[in-house]
Image: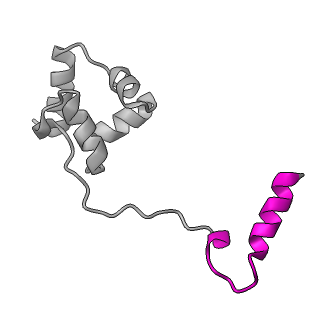
């Protein structure tokens, strides 16, 4: 039996739904489904699901990929004294 099928049986036996996990994790129902059924998950989510009582063997493994922080052009040094910041501030002020 696959991990996903075992997880589903475990949830059914405890009358748990993806909605229950969503509520406890602060995500949408589809977000909870995605976390529990993907190939790997971030370390923080793995730890949170363990804390909720999900057996480790039923969870996706922890991803070893480093999550990239979003980089915006206005956050990069450009040598033009922050022209993009000025545009942003102008748009926010109006």
Given the current orientation, which residue lies at the most extreme bottom position? 79
Q: Residue 48 at what x, y percent from top left?
A: 27, 36
Location of residue 47 in the rendering, given as x and y in whole percent from the top left corner: 23, 41
Q: Is residue 38 visible?
A: no
Position of 73 relative to 40 (above/below): below
Image quadrant of residue 80?
bottom right
Give yes or no for residue 87 being in the magenta stretch.
Answer: yes
Q: Which of the image's four quarters has the N terminus?
A: top left
x then y, percent, for residue 22 = 39, 27
Does residue 31 appear left or right of residue 71 in this picture? Answer: left
What is the number of callouts on the image? Answer: 0
Q: How is the image coloured?
A: one colour
In the foreground, 36 or 75: 75
Q: Is residue 57 above or below residue 39?
A: above
Residue sitting farthest toward the front: 81
Is 23 on the left-hand or right-hand side of 92? left
Q: Is residue 46 above or below residue 70?
A: above
Q: Which residues are magenta?
A: 73-93
User: Is residue 7 in sight in this rendering?
Assistant: yes
Which residue is drawn at the image coordinates 78% and 62% (left, top)?
A: 88
Q: Residue at x 31, y 20 (%)?
A: 17
Query: Horizontal and vertical percent for residue 72?
Result: 61, 67
| 34 sits to left or right of 83 | left
Residue 28 colored magenta? Answer: no
Q: Nearer the viewer, residue 92 or 60?
A: 92
Tell me which residue sits at (24%, 34%) in the image: 49
| Outermost residue toward the right in this view | 94
């Amino acid at each position: 039996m696959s991990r996903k099928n075992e997880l589903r049986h475990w949830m059914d036996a405890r009358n748990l739904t993806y909605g229950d996990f969503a509520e406890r994790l602060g995500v949408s129902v589809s977000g909870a489904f995605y976390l529990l059924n993907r190939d790997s998950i971030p370390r923080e989510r793995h730890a949170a699901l363990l804390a909720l009582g999900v057996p480790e063997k039923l969870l996706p493994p922890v991803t070893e990929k480093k999550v990239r922080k979003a980089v915006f052009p206005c956050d990069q040094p450009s040598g033009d004294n922050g022209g993009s910041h000025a545009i942003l501030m102008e748009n926010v002020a109006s």
